[in-house]
Amino acid sequence: MAHDIMVSMEKAVKKFDFTKGYEELESIVQDFESRELDLEKDLPKFERGLDLAKKLQDRLKEIENVVHTIEKKFST
Amino acid sequence: MEIVLTVSQCVEAINITLDSLGELTVEGEVSEYKIIQNKWVTFDIKDKQSVLKCFMTVWNLRTQIEDGMLVKITGNPNLRAKGFLSFVAKNVRPSGEGSMKRALELLQKKLAQEGLLSPERKRSLPRFPEHIAFITSRDAAAYNDFLKVLSARQGGLRISFIHTQVQGAEAPEQIIAALNMANTELSNLDAIVVVRGGGSSEDLMAFNDEQVVRAVASSRTPTVVAIGHERDVCLAELVADVRASTPSNAAELLVKHREEITLDIARLTSSLSQAVSERIAKKQSSIIGMTHTISNRLKATSKNAEQLVGRITSVSLRMRDTITTTSEKIRTMKRMLLALSPEKTLQRGYSITRSKSGAVLRDAKDVQKDDELTTTFAQGSITSVVQKNGS
């Protein structure tokens, strides 16, 4: 069957990458649990972890899911 | 007037007549089923009296058939140039419950032999899918069921919905096209979900269509497929990376509940804070330890100082004793010396004469006339001037 597909899609807005953020947080925790911390040197990393946790939690507060309908036409 | 046709013209005329019959659907039993060069399919269908030779492409054969199976075929009869009639089938469907079941068994066996059903092929879904291609009919209850459960679990997701028919003759091609499009045209896609609600086994046939099943199996993006109710198992579900029992279950398997993730994040944050506070506590205790060491050392030092003072005191006491004893000795010696001193001699009547410079004179030659001399007696002294040197 011949078909003609027409796609209309909004350009996705680049937003915070949840998976990357979560994995980074996990790796910071793993790192912190696996070695002796240097309070002065590791403080920025600690702050980064807290910041990531906040961003992740903010992202989870989103309620709506966006549904884009992709139009396609089939012709026989 | 007699019309004489060439053989080719005659065959063509017969075919025009045959075409005027339109598309025919014929039911019969398969025999002599063969696949030629993996491209062409030939078989006969027959009933008690008659046989029709059938021909079709492998692509159009979307189910598995075997000799003895009752099938319905749709297509057109065509008289071949070589003089035999061939029914060109566009589609073959097993006819009746028994044939349908058997066709499924055969296809499943074939897919299994190719390894398409093996658990090792299954990919796990991304932990946090954010962009999901959603393939179903917009009119199906499954559409709302999936989205409702999804929203209850998580927000902020991007759903690219592709509408397809989920039953009927058009459904397989549309589902294949939708899968193809999701895989090739959607960027940053995390998962493809294909769902359909319950229905009769005939309604669900599109999801047992060999090409649909292969399209699911070969999807570049991980797939979740939920067709019908729990008890219905379609081959498209068996080749999917994740099989869900219902469209709602597909949403549940796809995304975690936001509360569950919130809890996980809280756990991570608390581990982070704990690691830091443990370090602080350790540092504090090491500082306290150091303070103790220093104060202990200071105490030890002051104890040493006390000992030193004690020692100095005892030494000085001893020195005083020594001084007293020595003074006594000196006094004794002084008394002894006094007894032998010139004064004592003077008292016996001697005197000492000194020159002006104070030097004791022992020889008259050491003085000159007019020199001033001092003479010391036992009591007092006089100064005299030399008048004459007698020597």
Image (spheres, grey):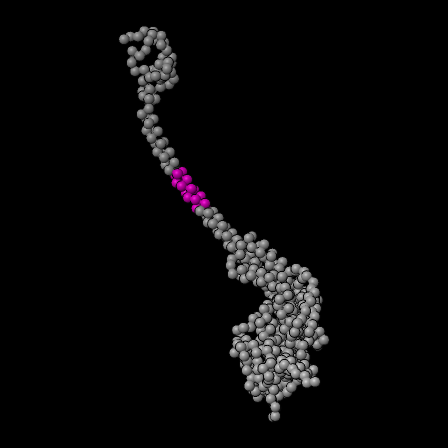
Count of picture labels: 0
Front-most of residues B338 and B321: B321
Instruction: Inspect this view and state whether residue B314 appears.
Output: yes
Residue B99, horizontal then vertical, whole percent: 60, 86
A19 to B193, vertically: above or below: above
Front-most of residues B365 and A16: A16
B296 to B181, vertically: above or below: above
Span of residues in magenta: B305-321
Residue A30, horizontal then vertical, whole percent: 54, 62
Specify whether residue B351 is painted magenta.
no
* Horizontal side of residue B60 vs B390, given as left or right: right
Quadrant in which the N terminus of chain B appears:
bottom right
Q: Residue at x 33, y 17 (%)?
A: B360
Quadrant in which the C terminus of chain B appears:
top left
Instruction: Inspect this view and state whether residue B97 appears.
Output: no
Query: Quadrant of the rendered structure where residue A2 is?
Result: bottom right
Q: Residue at x 56, y 71 (%)?
A: B123
Specify whether residue B312 is painted magenta.
yes
B384 to B68, vertically: above or below: above
Front-most of residues A47 and B71: B71
Q: Residue at x 65, y 86 (%)?
A: B26
Query: Quadrant of the rendered structure where residue B84 is?
Result: bottom right
Q: Residue at x 38, y 17 (%)?
A: B380
Residue at far front of view: B1
